[in-house]
Image (cartoon, helix red, strand yellow):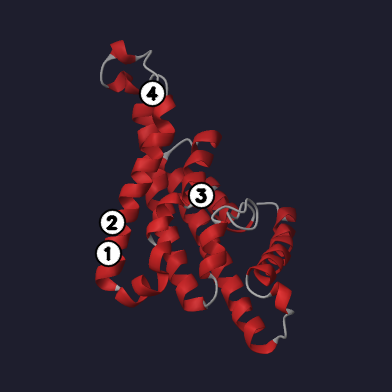
Amino acid sequence: MENLNLFIRSIFIDNMIFAYFLGMCSFIAVSKNVKTAFGLGIAVTCMLTLTLPINWMLETYVLREGALVWLNPDFADVDLSFLSLIVFIAVIASLTQLVEMIVEKYVPALYASLGIFLPLIAVNCAILGGSLFMQQRGFENLGTAVCAGAGWGIGWLLAITAVAAVRERVAQYSNVPASLRGVGITFIITALMGIAFMSFLGIKI
């Protein structure tokens, strides 16, 4: 039940976009149409769901102080936590390359539409932020890391798809002032949706 609560909370209350504003660069650039936004959202969800449990295992069994005691009791005082940031980034970059190769091979149209933003998932702060949140909050088991990663990914997917849908309708039916077109109106839409998502804070899970 705790993992289910964490999963729901990660989607709606601790939303990566509307609560922490992580991953805004690709969020703003790709949220021009729903199809492309949905594709990038799926890629980010896969990345978060895969990288969090991998980084949790590395943190638990390799990096934190005393983690290597399973190899030898003499390693009880070894602390490799200073390497955690580098290791997390290396895992994210490796998996990003794998996802990019898969998308290029099996969904070339999506690969072409995402362009440079697909390899830039490696430096998407939402992906790294998930691993750092995992480390900061001290997740107790692998299942918790998977649920949090999937929840944050689906929350990011929900956010970018919803904003892309609104941007399409605004571009089609609204006469936006020239000074606000593009990034300006996107920031306003994102802020309003962030305020709307704050209503979930009152839900007791």
At label 1, the amino acid type is Ile
Q: CA distance from mark 4 to mark 2?
A: 27 Å
Please state which of the two labelled residues, at mark 4 or mark 3, is closer to the viewer. Answer: 3
Q: Which mark is residue 125?
A: 3
Q: CA distance from mark 1 to mark 2?
A: 6 Å
How packed mark 1 is, by other alpha carbons closer than 10 Å (few <14, some 14-19, many 20 or more), is few
Residue at numbered disc 2: 98
Viewer-side residue, 178 vs 150: 178
Q: CA distance from mark 3 to mark 2?
A: 18 Å
How packed mark 4 is, by other alpha carbons closer than 10 Å (few <14, some 14-19, many 20 or more), is some
Discs 1, 2 touching: Cβ within 8 Å? yes
**In which quadrant of the rendered view does residue 11 lie?**
bottom right
At label 4, the amino acid type is Leu
Regarding mark 2 in the picture, which secondary structure is present there? helix
Q: Position of residue 157 (x, y in %)?
A: 51, 65
Please state which of the two labelled residues, at mark 3 or mark 1, is closer to the viewer. Answer: 3
Residue at numbered disc 1: 102
Residue at numbered disc 4: 80
